[in-house]
Amino acid sequence: MANIFSQFKFKYKFRDYQARALGEIEKYLANNKIHIVAAPGAGKTALALQKMIDIGEPALILVPTIALREQWKNRFKTDFSQGEDLTDIISDDLKTPKLITVITYQSLYADYAAITKKNRASVIACRLREANVKVIILDEAHHLKAAWLDATNDLINKLGDIITISLTATPPYDMKQSVWRKYINLCGDIDIEITVPELIKSNDLAEHQDYILFNYPNKSQLADIESIKCKIDEFVERIRLSEKLITAVSLHDGIIDVTTKLDYFINNFDYYLAMLRFLHFNKAPIPKNNLSISDASISALRLADLELLLSYCLWNDSKSYTEFSAFFREVRKELKSIGAIVDKKVNLHGTEGIKERVTQNIGKLNSIKDIIEEEKQSLGKKLKLVIISENIYASALDLWDEEEFKLIGVIPIFAMLVRKEIEEAIVLTGEITIIPTRLKALLYSVASLFGVAPEDISVRELGFDFDYARVYFSSGTSKKAVAIITALFEKSDTFVLVGTSALIGEGWDAPFVNALIMATSIASFVTSNQVRGRAIRTCKAIHDKAANIWHLVCVEKLGQDNYALGQDYKILKRRFEAFEGVGIDGDLIDHGIERLNIVDKPYNSSELVELNKATLSSALNRDEMRIHWSKALKTYQPVRISKFHITSDEDTKLIEVIKTGSLGFLSSFRGLNRLLRSSFKIMLKEKSPSIFSLRNGALFFVGDTILKTLKHMNIISESAKLVFLHRYGQTGFYLQDSTIKENSIFREAFVEMLSEIENPRYIIKVKQNYFAVPDIIGTNRENTDFLLGKLRLTRQGNLIFTRNPDGKAKLFLIKLNQKKIKASWHYSKEEKNPDLIQTNVDIQVMKNVLKSRDL
């Protein structure tokens, strides 16, 4: 069949890493899914359009915003066409698809939701089949969550034989495991990755470094925090002894007879544990039917258990508590009043009120002041610094006095800069735009370059400070406002711009920016990476650009002069899993916060002062930062290294596998501690500061066995070698001489086997220890047997199949055993199928027991 795009050709030369990516794509088309992760500025759009042309079939391109929709259309016209009339080729309407149809995810979902539920995807798929659409490009695929993901996945499944090309700079690694798997099922495993260091090496991104400054909440905020903590303590004290809650949990079908909810509890196991711990804490009767649990083996009730239990009672499992709906409405109301509900989850550790006062504390203004003074000393008139905040707090325009500010935001930051005469600044948000009044003439001049006349702009001086003015654009020109103010900032001698993460995130183009302060509590990999990416773009006008990126952390008071880095630091630590950069005093490139050499421990005020001084001093020396990058890039391998934490225990070094940014879910892996007590023994002998000899240890043995099995399955090439490295106090592993995709597959399988048992198809038993057979292996019995053979284990007595009733019961017991809960399953003489066994506890009898306790 003829290629319908044969007359279109890329007008320019692809960069080396783009050409490499295009060469690799063909290898991964076997499953009709291509998943490309590429740093901002890597040219993902050009790659996808070229692949679309190579395939030569009609395509649907899905994007998250209208601006990106227009960008795709323009990119095809400017970079691939020879000036042809494209009216009959490109469409942005799903109802009239053409050879290239570009629409937003919102548009697809709106069309999808408007159709009768039964026929939703079928109607749209029929329309696309008539247009012969064979390719779907998912741009910024990290936006595919919840409803958008379900609608897109449904459509692709209905279309059947379709090629998907998924593009993102920031895979949503912070998703829950279940959502991450949905995302990977839609997009496929990551096939190709173009990393930030690769782009720096090719001079397509600027060298940069991250820095952290610590600060304190003010007295007012500390008082507010203590008040909120008291309210939480009062609520917890009441709810953990609540007779109505005890009754509701005791009468849950799965507590009365676990066999009726076995599948549900296997997949929601922590909820079951929270129920057990809550009932045990209150000495409530737990029925002894098929499953017998020793009360003495149930651990103490934790605050996290109470959070989880209430979250399920209020949302996830609310249908099981319909008789108690009035009670739970009151609970929800009280939790909301103390700010303990976040995204339909109960949060009693750090409610929204406490989090807000910590992450958005006014003390961060002092850090901003210090940074600006240091950056001016470093760069002088070359400085172009952007301060990002999540919130505007427009009401602060009426306050203007720093003492009256409650939380940090765009206007409080701007007011502080102006009131203390620290630095002149521009404000750019979707709601408020402010410029120095003296720039009025330059504003009109810049606006004319965008076709906007002076009469379309209104400039009004602020009533309390005539040196500044608010800017208003007419409705017809408002879409150009961001571009105009950005150009004004570039051309003016004003050094500082303050804006919101929503406006200055995805798509904002200001390559001249060389310093960024993230005065924000964003934890999301996606959003924080987008905001950070604004500062690291190269600029043709600045040949030696190097950027500093500043992160602000509010410490939490422990005692008179004792501070913990606290939850603000935890948010930042999570954020750093998405960042790959050079060590602050070394020549290695790595992801994670460890490369900044900050120890998470209590500090006194003088120690924090010295820590901040050292950071500010280091940030002044951009030349040294460039040298670090230059050395690091010489040995850099574009493979994300999965990490282990190491602690010393006499002659044996215990290793706890922790979450890596590559897996897309947040949980600790404790399997290796069990493995240490099994027939495998891990003895790590340090050969050098950077390399460990693990070839004779169990860790290498297990990893190498998985690798051999994946090679046997022809999933990983024979040349791949398992390598362990030691850096920044951690040990990591990766596959040498292998592709990004092979590393991704191996990493997930290796960690899955060493993790706590979730819900695998097969489980391996080694003495009294249990290990999951990785899903990619366990889907096939022959591959599972090969793995057992390489582990020197026999099939009989070592393998448990979990998909029949007996296996489910064993899986449930294994999961309880992981939590050190002693339990046993009792089969009736007549029936060995636990799913068919009837409970020997009558529900009415149970209710009467509870009533006798006045519950």
Image (tube, rainbow, N blue to C red):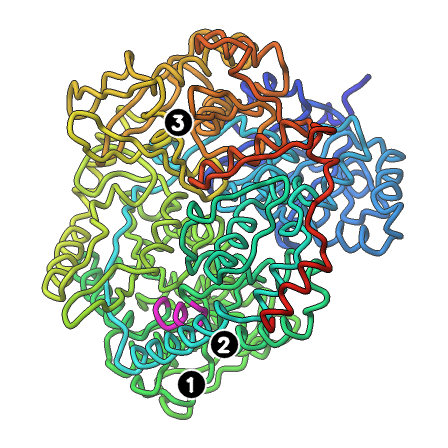
Residue occupying image coordinates x 39% and y 63%: 520
Main secondary structure type of the part rendered in magenta = helix
Instruction: Work out whether mark 3 precedes mark 1 in sequence or the reverse, and give the earlier one.
Output: 1
Q: Which residue in the protein does label 2 denote? A: 432
Residue denoted by label 1: 397
Q: Is residue 604 left or right of residue 359?
A: left
Residue 603 occupies which quadrant of the picture? bottom left
Q: Residues within 10 Å of mark 1 (few under 14, many from 20)?
A: some
Over which residues does the magenta segment extend? 351-359
Image coordinates for residue 690, horizontal then vertical, percent: 20, 25
Residue positioned 73% across, 60% down in the render: 844
Q: Tell me which residue sits at (35%, 17%) in the image.
A: 679
> Residue at label 3?
639
- Amino acid type indicated by mark 3: Val
Residues at discs 1 and 2 in contact (Cβ within 8 Å)? yes
Q: How far apart are labels 1 and 2 at the CA level?
A: 10 Å
Q: Name the one closer to the observer, 448 or 751.
A: 751
